[in-house]
Image (cartoon, grey):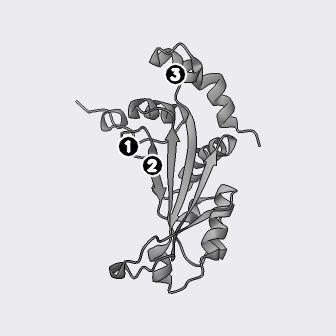
């Protein structure tokens, strides 16, 4: 399916960022390389007292549109009741149109569904220009039927860009319409 966000990126955002950043080649403009969606389930399965993670796998498949890869423990750690080869998480890597579709869904559908949402802090970028954020409940995604959910788990998302500059990544995400928190100075005018 063609992504509306990707079309807007090519037609509007690329020329605007070229002008703002002083770039001459459109290939230098920051873009999304991939989006990694992760669900940690080691402590979740312990808390639930079960070894069946098929419901988590089905949920991640519905949210992303791809079957997740099950991540397993490499070694045993007795303090965490972890044994070698136990499932500890799931991950999905989205590239191309699927990545832009997922980001569009997060910006326009998922964040408005978060209760009491006031914006994302701007400190979500690492030194390599990647953007990481998460949701404490997977029920904010529209593909999840809240009536069928027995147990709630979190979802972590990392947006990997081709730039190594966090400022350029922040500009790119702001152009996409990512819901950043407003600065206090912008939010409320000071009364005299």
Q: Quadrant of the C terminus?
A: top left
- Residue 121, by quadrant, is top left
* Residue 37 picture location, percent across and down: 55, 55
**Would you place residue 27 above or below residue 105 in this image?**
above
Whether residue 141 appears in this view of the structure is yes
Circle 2/circle 1 CB separation < 8 Å = yes
**Label 2 secondary element:** strand
Q: Which of 181 and 56 is in front in this view?
A: 56
Going from the N terminus, do you reach mark 3 or mark 2 first? 3
Q: How crowded is mark 1: few (under 14 residues within 10 Å), some or many (20 or more)?
A: few
Q: Real-space Cα distance between discs 3 and 2?
A: 22 Å
Farthest bottom residue in view: 49
**Apparent side of residue 95 relative to residue 186 in the rendered image (left or right):** right
Residue hosting label 2 = 132
- Residue 27: x %, y % from top left: 58, 22
Kindly identify which residue carries mark 1. 126
Label disc, if present, on residue 17 of the rendered structure: 3
The residue at the point 67 percent across, 69 percent down is 58
Tags 1 and 3 touching, CB below 8 Å: no
Q: Can residue 143 be seen in this view?
A: no
Residue 68 relative to residue 156: left or right: right
């Amino acid at each position: 399916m063609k992504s509306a966000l990707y079309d807007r990126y090519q037609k509007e955002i690329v020329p605007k960022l070229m002008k703002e950043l002083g770039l001459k080649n459109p290939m230098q403009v920051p873009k999304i390389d991939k989006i990694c969606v992760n669900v940690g389930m080691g402590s979740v399965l312990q808390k639930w007292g079960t070894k069946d993670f098929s419901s988590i796998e089905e949920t991640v498949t519905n949210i992303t549109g791809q079957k997740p890869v099950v991540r397993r423990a490499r070694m045993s750690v007795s303090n965490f009741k972890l044994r070698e080869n136990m499932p500890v998480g799931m991950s999905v890597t989205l590239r191309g149109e699927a990545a832009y579709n997922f980001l569009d869904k997060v910006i326009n559908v998922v964040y408005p569904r978060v209760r009491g949402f006031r914006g994302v802090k701007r400190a979500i970028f690492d030194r390599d220009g990647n953007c990481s954020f998460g949701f404490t409940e997977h029920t904010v995604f529209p593909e999840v039927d809240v009536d069928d959910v027995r147990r709630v788990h979190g979802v972590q998302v990392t947006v990997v860009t081709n730039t190594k500059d966090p400022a350029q990544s922040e500009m790119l995400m702001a152009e996409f319409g990512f819901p950043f928190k407003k600065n206090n100075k912008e939010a409320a005018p000071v009364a005299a």
